[in-house]
Image (spheres, rainbow, N blue to C red):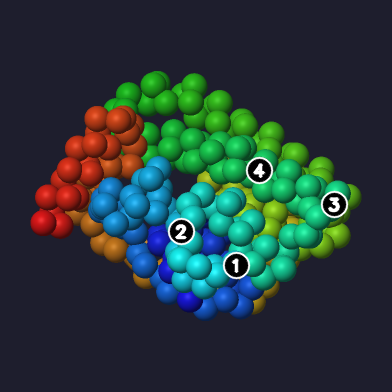
Amino acid sequence: MIDVHYWPTPNGWKITIMLEECGLAYNVIPVDIGGGDQFKAEFLRISPNNRMPAIVDHDPVGGGEPLSLFESGAILEYLADKTGKFLPRSGHDRYRVLQWVHWQMANLGPMMGNANHFKNYGKNIAGDPKQLEYGTRRFVGEVDRLSGVMDAQLSANQFLAGADYTIADIITWPWAMAIGRLIDESMWDKFPHLKRWVDEVGARDAVEKGFAVRRDLREQKLTEEEEKRRRDLLFNQTNDSVRKAREAAAQAAS
């Protein structure tokens, strides 16, 4: 059994989709990232970067004690190696897949996260819209550029790393499928190959199941004060603010 420390966000969906694709049994442990669960001592023991997702495999490769992992790219690579699925064992094809996995981790995810922050969340924090103009333009423009990178790759390949569906597709789809919603649905007209791939991957049974895991957690009704508290927890973190959040979580647990 694999414990999945999870919240229904693009990074969380990567793991539940992969687990569904691999047919592995798993147990979902919600990590309410707006409520401060990521600062609790028991979570920090497996994810010292205070970010979800993370997993604990109670039947790890090679046996022995349970194995904990954080960072979605590392988790998907581990699960692929554990099951022998969606990642070639060796050779050129393996590294063609891994380059796109790292591309997503370093590019699409962070850039879309920043674009979403400046375009949607920032207006609730900054107050002055002019403070957001440069950041919005910078990161929305980068998402546009990265969409073009994917569209060009998918114009010559069925999937991101070539002819086969791999963890490169699994790790990228949860972010890529939201590009139109983040920026403008008309963007899909510019990137028809990317749209074709988003639709094909999204129609897979395992993707639909993984995407639906604990969807109810996203439907919580919050007061304005609760929304503000969540924004304070999620954004503009420093070492001091994280330390205080950890202390508050420890005090609440005692």
Instruction: For the residues labelled 4 and 3, say whether their Cβ atoms are less than 8 Å apart.
Output: no
- Relative image position of residue 251 (x, y in whole percent): 12, 50
Task: Identify the residue under disc 4.
Answer: 102
- Relative image position of residue 48 (x, y in whole percent): 38, 45
Which residue is at the far right?
156
Instruction: For the residues labelled 4 and 1, say whether their Cβ atoms are less than 8 Å apart.
Output: no
Q: Residue at x 80, y 48 (%)?
A: 96
Task: Identify the residue under disc 2.
Answer: 68
Mark 1 or mark 3: which comes first in sequence?
1
What amino acid is labelled 4 in the image? His
- Relative image position of residue 47 (x, y in whole percent): 40, 50
Task: Identify the residue under disc 3.
Answer: 91
Mark 2 or mark 3: which comes first in sequence?
2
Distance, label 4 to label 1, CA atoms, is: 26 Å
- Per the image, label 2 sits on a secondary structure element best described as strand
Distance, label 2 to label 1, CA atoms, is: 14 Å
What amino acid is labelled 2 in the image? Ser
Marks 2 and 1: which is nearer the front? 1
